[in-house]
Image (spheres, grey):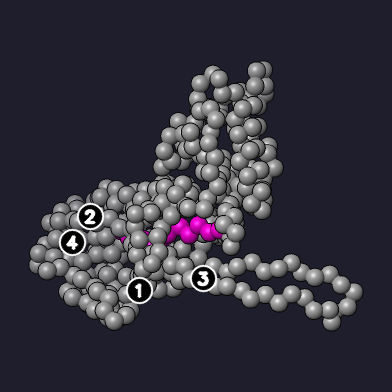
Amino acid sequence: MGDIIQVKNNKFIAQGDVAGRLLANNMNPNALRTNTVLRKDEWKTIDQSVLDVHLDRLVGVQDLISRGLTFQIGDGLGSTVLESENVDDVSAAVMSMSPVVKGQNDAVNFELEYLPLPIVHKDFQIDIRKLTASRKRGEALDTTLARKASRKVSEKIETVLFNGSSTYSFGGGTIYGYTDFPTRNTATIPLAWTGSAKTGELILADVLDWKQALINDNMFGPYILYIPTNYETVLDGEFKLNSDLTIRERLMKLDGIADIKVIDKLTASNIVLVQMTDDTIRMVNGLNLTTVQWESNGGFLVHFKVMQILVPQIRADSSDNCGVLHASL
């Protein structure tokens, strides 16, 4: 039987050498990053390759991270859920000429919410003979498998942000994305953005309607408009006949539209308009992108795991107003 870490009576119980090392080091993954097999420069090569590919595939996630829309958990590998509170709104402030005038006292209701914190991971392995042969030839370590593993991890995280994982539930919580969050705003695209019948002016009218829907929910931006790949070249067309603007350029002139991004994880003809504020969306970071290593088969086989805990937390207020709008045909 392999390495297993179980939770019993709120305590972690380890079985196996790798699990034992993690538990003995308070679930710190650096316990599995030693120089006993890989040299320091080889670790640098793997880490850089993994990071380069990872960032290339994170478009929507990087939009959030670059704006500081994150929540850091100190011990993500040792935590399975994030517990947070949803608080009812309170009454309006009172205006009077005297500070002794009593305002309305509110009894605030707190509802606990839970967000699962699964590990997104992909494994690869290197034969110890191949590793030794590359050193003897003075060749750099082949990072092809590391790059592929990193790509799979980042693609999974990006997919969850946009499409959610509502079938994945744990600890009383469910992971949702932009297109499956229950209280998101929804809209129907009256006419597909492809074909000659859909003019730039009609596309502009769609976006204006969606922006107004978010404003009606007291969500005033800034917004990012995410479109699928089948609409990418559409936005490069002329806004209208003899116009000096493309459709993309005209949409970018709308107040509050901070950017327009193409997302290959969005299903064809699905569009998302998102308010970039932490009361709408944040990425919960329980573990930075990490590569760990262990051996098997008497040390002849070196195993690696690229892993990260990075989960979207989409939020709505007590009236179910939400800064996410999902439009589809």
* Quadrant position of residue 110: bottom right
Q: Say what amino acid the circle numbered 3 marks.
A: Glu
The amino acid pointed to by label 4 is Val
CA gap between label 3 and label 4 equals 46 Å
Q: Spatial distance from mark 1 to mark 2, Cα to Cα?
A: 23 Å
Indicate which disc residue 78 carries.
Answer: 1
Residue in the foreground of this view, choosing between 315 and 23 = 315
Q: Nearer the viewer, mark 2 or mark 4?
A: 2
Say whether disc 3 or disc 1 marks the residue closer to the N-terminus.
1
Q: CA distance from mark 4 to mark 1?
A: 25 Å
Residue at point 47%, 52% (across, down)? 181
| Mark 2 secondary-structure assignment | strand
Q: Quadrant of residue 132?
A: bottom left
Amino acid found under the numbered disc labelled 1: Gly
Query: Which stretch is magenta?
Result: 306-316
The secondary structure type at the circle numbered 4 is strand
Q: Name the residue beneath numbered marker 2.
A: 124
Q: Check disc 4 and report the residue beneath it.
A: 302
Q: Is residue 114 above or below residue 249?
A: below
Q: Assess disc 3: are there few (<14), some (14-19) or many (≥20) residues with their C-alpha within 10 Å of its C-alpha.
A: few
**What main secondary structure does the magenta stretch of the protein show?**
strand
For marks 3 and 4 on the same chain, the one whose residue lies earlier in the sequence: 3
Q: Are marks 2 and 4 in contact (CB under 8 Å)?
A: no
